[in-house]
Amino acid sequence: MIRVFTRRWLVLLLCVFLSGCSATRVIYNQFDWALAWYISDYFTLDDEQEDWLDEAIKRNIEWHRRNQLPGYAQLLREFERGVSSGEMTPEKLEYHYITFITLWDEFVVQVMPDVSAFFLMLSRVQVDEFYANLEESNQELWDEYAGKTPQERKKSRQDVGVKIFDRVFAGLTPGQEDLVRSYQSSLHDLSLEWMAGRRQWQQDFRALVLERPTEPEFSARLKDLLLNPNGKDSLQYRQRTDENRRIIMTMIIALREELTDKQLKRFAKRARKIARNLEIVTAQKI
């Protein structure tokens, strides 16, 4: 569950950045119904459950608006200053990464009571439906991002990396594209382990929901699953994911050195405007 929603939140944040400044407020202000619509793909809910879910989503997004958007705005401003000044280091990038994860974990803790209540109200039929839809999502993710062969997966990583940085910096030169592809090609291919871990987490989650222990125990075990989704990963897998993160950070620093003044100015202008829009959204009364 958390692996699904984590990915969606990361996609949302990336879309907010890539969509441009004026769209930032529109995207965020429409996120409540978009999230409800997304969740409805996994469950068939009755009217009472839908009403409860709508209220829970609105309540938690409002909390996120007031308590976390300022943190994301600040993080974006700090990242922009580091890129613009040329003072970005692996340590600073690691700080940005940890700050993002910390904000996410704070949000998980905030929504925990509602997530717990929601799953405790589901029937066995609804839980089975959810799990079946998760497995369908697993296959779609595999087909879209993994590919059938190691070479296909390598090319997919390269293409995705180039696409992201091309949009962030409003276009890459051929040399910059080659740099991104080179670093992306050196990443460990963890697709098989990632999918196995994803399915293991989903099985553990399903078992907990079907077991239905008392509410305090259910919430405590659910919190552990949500805040520690990689608890069963092997040491080798964790080491390789850490290595991949370091490769990506090294790539960002290397790419920064190849950016033109024009690219840097466009990036800085966009980042500052989006940070400002996040601050405006924070101050809005809903």
Image (cartoon, rainbow, N blue to C red):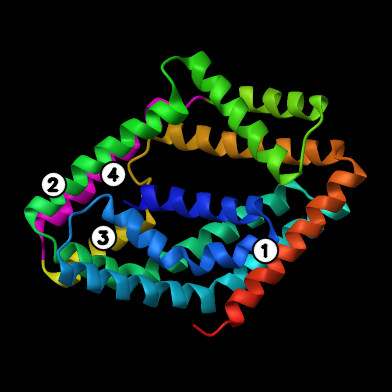
Give x and y (percent) for residue 240.
51, 32
Q: Which residues are magenta?
A: 189-213
Task: Give the residue at x 71% y 37%.
Answer: 166
| Label placed on residue 200 | none
Task: Give the residue at x 80% y 25%.
Answer: 174
Q: Is residue 212 magenta?
A: yes
Q: What is the spatial separation of the Cα atoms under label 3 and label 1, in whole angstroms? A: 38 Å
The crowding category of the residue bearing disc 1, from other C-alpha atoms within 10 Å (few below 14, some 14 to 19, many at least 20), is: few
Which image quarter: residue 46? bottom left
Q: Is residue 171 left or right of residue 17?
A: right
User: Looking at the image, is mark 2 or mark 4 nearer the viewer?
Assistant: 2
Q: Is residue 183 magenta?
A: no
Mark 3, residue position: 222
Q: Secondary structure at mark 4?
A: helix
The answer to whether mark 2 and mark 3 are in CB contact below 8 A is no
Main SS, magenta region, reads: helix
Mark 1, residue position: 22
| Label placed on residue 201 | 4
Precedes in sequence: disc 2 or disc 3: 2
Inspect the image, locate mark 1, and give the three-letter code of the amino acid beneath it: Ser
Q: Is residue 28 above or below residue 181?
A: below
Q: What is the spatial separation of the Cα atoms under label 1 and label 4, in whole angstroms? A: 38 Å
Q: Is residue 21 left or right of residue 231?
A: right
User: Looking at the image, is mark 1 or mark 4 nearer the viewer?
Assistant: 1
Mark 2, residue position: 128
Q: Is residue 226 above or below residue 204?
A: below
